[in-house]
């Protein structure tokens, strides 16, 4: 069995993609080697991915299928090709037809040196890659900004992950090759846009096979392959959205992953397991190279990532609660109710807001910590509130009809209150904001602030320290 497209591919692609993939397929048919992929439940797969996150091992590979999920609903490759063909033939008539498939269309215009000037600028809708980020984009952005994900790689040219990061007050670190990623600030989890970016370099998006051996793409792909081989070494890989109709772009990614040997691979795709080897054989072989498991979970990529983000957030809050257990015991003389050590929050937006407060994010700063600070006072305060009968109320705690917001702030409380004056207003302002770790300082009369209503807090919000809260709420 040989590669049906081999005659039309460059030597670079033949040596790095087709021979390895189809020799594997030949070997499978000749020797009956069993596939290593296991169909795994969503719950188990999220658990595997969460373990990788906690242990700083997870890298994400995201393809076009991710951005096709609602509410983004970006068009498929087949839709883009159909629209381009209709538009071209409406302008030039049936006497000048162009190919039907997007791969062949891009190659046709590349060979005519019109890929950028005609195909990208005239036939492809300039707004085709714009939309609202979906929960999957939000999850990727959040987990990159806190560096729970070690890196992410996407074949998408849209900017929905970056947009989701901006909605979370953060700037995702992006590059279109290994050199660009190396220039990012230290401590940034990078997003490699392997096929280019509609925003930063629209003329050189990788859509045609001929681009692989032409500059600037040839050098860019080589630099990216080198970066991938170094940064994906022995990592756990989560693959989302690659088993789509944009087959050529999947092959480009596979050619850059030729030397990668992952530890574990989790594939998220709604297709039947039997269909995956046919739809993306090179990526299927990548999974079969995994040393510690190759898992297929039949789920929406966006939904799976949202579930993973929620599990990650719950783990973060759980660690905060457990960090306060000994301090609670020392003060109360008895252990807390085990139910109080489990995070009661249930949706990603609430959990994200709570994580920001628990790590001490200032207004309009993203969540930036994958693991909470080792500070028992926050967890102790949350346990003590629950011991008094407080129940969760959105991102706040409700104790005897009063809404209480808990945040970490190790600085004078008048400074904390002033910083939060310009915060984006919450839907409902809390009655109390407890700044755990803050100190109350007596200010000279000349600079003492007069409490006034603000758009963020309304008239009822009152800022207090933890010692004040202990007295106010009888903790």
Image (cartoon, rainbow, N blue to C red):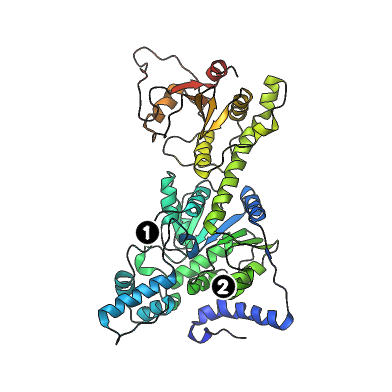
Q: In the rendering, which numbered label is found on residue 280?
A: 2
Quadrant where the C terminus is found in the figure: top right
| Residue 292 in the image, given as x and y percentages of width and height | 70, 61
| Residue 347 in the image, given as x and y percentages of width and height | 53, 43
Looking at the image, which residue sits at the far left? 91
Label 2 and label 1: CA atoms lie apart by: 26 Å
Q: Residue at x 51, y 71 (%)?
A: 250
Residue 70 visible in the shown view: yes
Quadrant where the N terminus is found in the figure: bottom right
Q: Residue at x 38, y 75 (%)?
A: 82
Q: Residue at x 41, y 15 (%)?
A: 443
- In what element is the residue under mark 2? loop
Q: Residue at x 46, y 60 (%)?
A: 67
| Along the line of sight, the residue nearer the viewer: 396 or 288 | 396
Badge 2 or badge 1: first in the primary sequence: 1
| Along the line of sight, the residue nearer the viewer: 468 or 17 | 468
Q: Quadrant of residue 331?
A: top right
- In what element is the residue under mark 1? loop
Looking at the image, which residue sits at the far front? 401
Task: Indicate whether 265 appears above or below 133.
Answer: below
Q: In the rendering, which numbered label is found on residue 130?
A: 1
| Residue 245 in the image, given as x and y percentages of width and height | 49, 72
């Amino acid at each position: 069995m040989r590669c049906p497209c081999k005659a039309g591919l460059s030597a670079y692609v033949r040596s790095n993609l087709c021979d390895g993939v189809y020799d594997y397929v030949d070997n499978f048919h000749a020797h009956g080697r069993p596939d290593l992929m296991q169909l795994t439940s969503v719950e188990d797969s999220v658990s595997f991915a969460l373990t990788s996150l906690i242990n700083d091992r997870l890298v994400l590979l995201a393809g076009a299928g991710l951005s096709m999920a609602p509410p983004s609903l970006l068009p498929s490759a087949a839709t883009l090709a159909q629209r381009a063909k209709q538009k071209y033939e409406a302008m030039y008539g049936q006497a000048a037809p162009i190919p039907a498939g997007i791969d062949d269309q891009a190659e046709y215009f590349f060979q005519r040196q019109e890929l950028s000037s005609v195909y990208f600028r005239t036939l492809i809708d300039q707004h085709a890659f714009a939309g609202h980020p979906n929960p999957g984009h939000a999850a990727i952005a959040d987990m990159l900004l806190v560096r729970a994900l070690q890196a992410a790689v996407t074949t998408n040219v849209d900017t929905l992950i970056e947009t989701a990061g901006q909605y979370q007050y953060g700037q995702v670190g992006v590059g279109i090759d290994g050199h660009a990623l190396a220039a990012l600030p230290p401590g940034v989890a990078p997003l490699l846009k392997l096929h280019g970016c509609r925003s930063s370099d629209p003329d050189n998006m990788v859509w045609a096979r001929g681009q692989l051996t032409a500059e600037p793409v040839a050098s860019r792909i080589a630099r990216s392959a080198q970066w991938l081989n170094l940064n994906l070494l022995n990592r756990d890989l989560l693959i989302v959205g690659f088993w789509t109709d944009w087959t050529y772009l999947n092959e480009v990614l596979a050619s850059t992953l030729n030397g990668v040997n992952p530890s574990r691979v989790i594939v998220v795709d709604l297709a039947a397991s039997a269909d995956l080897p046919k739809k993306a054989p090179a990526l299927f072989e990548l999974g079969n190279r995994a040393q510690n498991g190759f898992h297929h979970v039949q789920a929406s990529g966006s939904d799976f990532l949202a579930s993973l983000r929620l599990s990650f957030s719950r783990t973060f809050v759980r660690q905060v609660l457990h960090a306060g257990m000994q301090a609670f015991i020392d003060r109360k003389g008895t252990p807390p109710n085990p139910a109080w050590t489990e995070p009661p929050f249930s949706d990603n937006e609430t959990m994200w807001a709570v994580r920001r407060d628990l790590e001490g994010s200032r207004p309009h700063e993203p969540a930036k910590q994958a693991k909470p600070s080792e500070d028992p006072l926050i967890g102790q305060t949350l346990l003590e509130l629950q011991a008094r009968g407080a129940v969760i109320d959105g991102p706040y705690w409700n104790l005897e009809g009063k809404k209480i917001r808990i945040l970490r702030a190790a600085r004078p409380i008048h400074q904390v209150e002033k910083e939060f004056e310009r915060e984006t207003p919450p839907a409902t302002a809390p009655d109390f904001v407890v700044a755990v770790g803050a100190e109350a300082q007596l200010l000279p009369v000349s600079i003492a602030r007069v409490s006034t209503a603000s758009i963020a807090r309304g008239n009822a919000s009152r800022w207090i320290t933890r010692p004040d809260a202990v007295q106010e709420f009888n903790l």
